[in-house]
Image (cartoon, coloured by chain):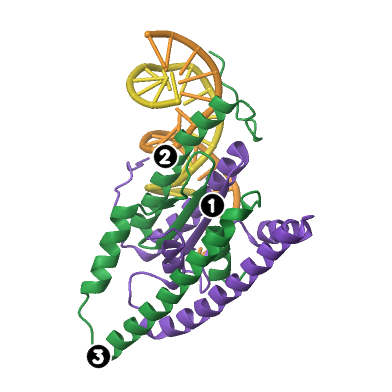
Chain colours: A green, B purple, C yellow, D orange
Amino acid sequence: MTRKKVKLAFITNDSARKATFRKRKKGLMKKLSELSTLCGIDICAIIYSSYESQPEVWPDNRGIHRVLAQFKGMPEMEQSKKMVNQESFIRQRIAKASEQLKKQHKENREKQITPVMYQCLTGVGL
Amino acid sequence: MTRKKVKLAFITNDSARKATFRKRKKGLMKKLSELSTLCGIDICAIIYSSYESQPEVWPDNRGIHRVLAQFKGMPEMEQSKKMVNQESFIRQRIAKASEQLKKQHKENREKQITPVMYQCLTGVGL
DNA sequence: CTTGCTATTTATAACGT
DNA sequence: TACGTTATAAATAGCAA
């Protein structure tokens, strides 16, 4: 059997590219999960491909909702509660602006960078 | 030599955990790069750990700046230019709110989810 | 197009320095 | 504590159905 050594370049064959995408995406998700568990850290990953109309994210919805529920149900002092509320308020503003950005971007599909990526970038001061 | 089969749980030993983090982060970055190149897609990943004061991102600064420069230098009609400008404006608002959120979060370190993650989540409508 | 199967390549845990 | 080595575990390219 012939088993090539992975030519690190864009796969021009459509079906082969998609197959590789599905396999490697699965592997990547597993790696993300393992790193997060083993080292106890927060990771966020977003994949924006033409294979899915919506960006694919990690953690998945279930994981995200679990974290959010935990956050909401967390016992807290008044002060921290206040801080949480302020954070919620700011998050709402971000979400609102994100909606606008997403809407705006609908007319602008051919651009090579997505609103989601913009948020990631601006989120870390880039 | 004894080579364990990876116990998928938090590594309690500090130095061992950090060593694993460094190795696996390197591997993860490589996987991200390969998937992006092979399949021609946009990926964004953010790692928020206690090992670095700033979140670590992929692509790195060089890659991000290259993409942004490409975006800025892109020839465009008036209408798309206008849309870009509007996007820039919204992005500024997001960045500004992000700063506030980050500042607010400084007093709230023990929470299990970070401002950056919040942005990622709200960015995809979660 | 998707799933299962291995031959190979790649990642990495445990050590040694 | 960080870096190099190597045995073993894990990921995956190419095929078959």
Image location (x, y in percent) of residue C15 = 42, 49
**Residue kind at label 2, given as amino acid type:** Lys
Mark 3 nearby-residue class (10 Å; few <14, some 14–19, many ≥20):
few
Mark 2 nearby-residue class (10 Å; few <14, some 14–19, many ≥20):
few
Q: Mark 2 belongs to which subunit? A: A
Tell me the residue at 45%/76% (across/down).
Answer: A93
Q: Quadrant of residue B77?
A: bottom right
Tell me the residue at 50%/54% (across/down).
Answer: B25
Q: Are marks 3 and 2 on the same chain?
A: yes
Image location (x, y in percent) of residue B63 = 67, 56
Secondary structure of the residue carrying numbered label 3:
helix
Mark closer to the observer (3, 2)? 3
Labelled disc at residue A26: 2
Q: Quadrant of the C terminus of chain B?
A: bottom left
Could one spot residue A84 in this view of the protein? yes
**Near-viewer residue (B45 or A4):** B45
Q: Quadrant of residue A4?
A: top right
Residue A66 is left or right of residue B63, and the answer is left
| Mark 1 to mark 3 CA distance (whole Å) | 41 Å
| Mark 3 to mark 2 CA distance (whole Å) | 42 Å
Q: Are marks 1 and 3 on the same chain?
A: no
**Residue kind at label 3, given as amino acid type:** Glu
Image location (x, y in percent) of residue B101 = 46, 80
Tell me the residue at 47%/79% (across/down).
Answer: B102
Residue A111, placed above or below residue A16: below
Image location (x, y in percent) of residue A6 = 60, 30
Could one spot residue B57 in this view of the protein? no
- The residue that mark 3 highlights is A78
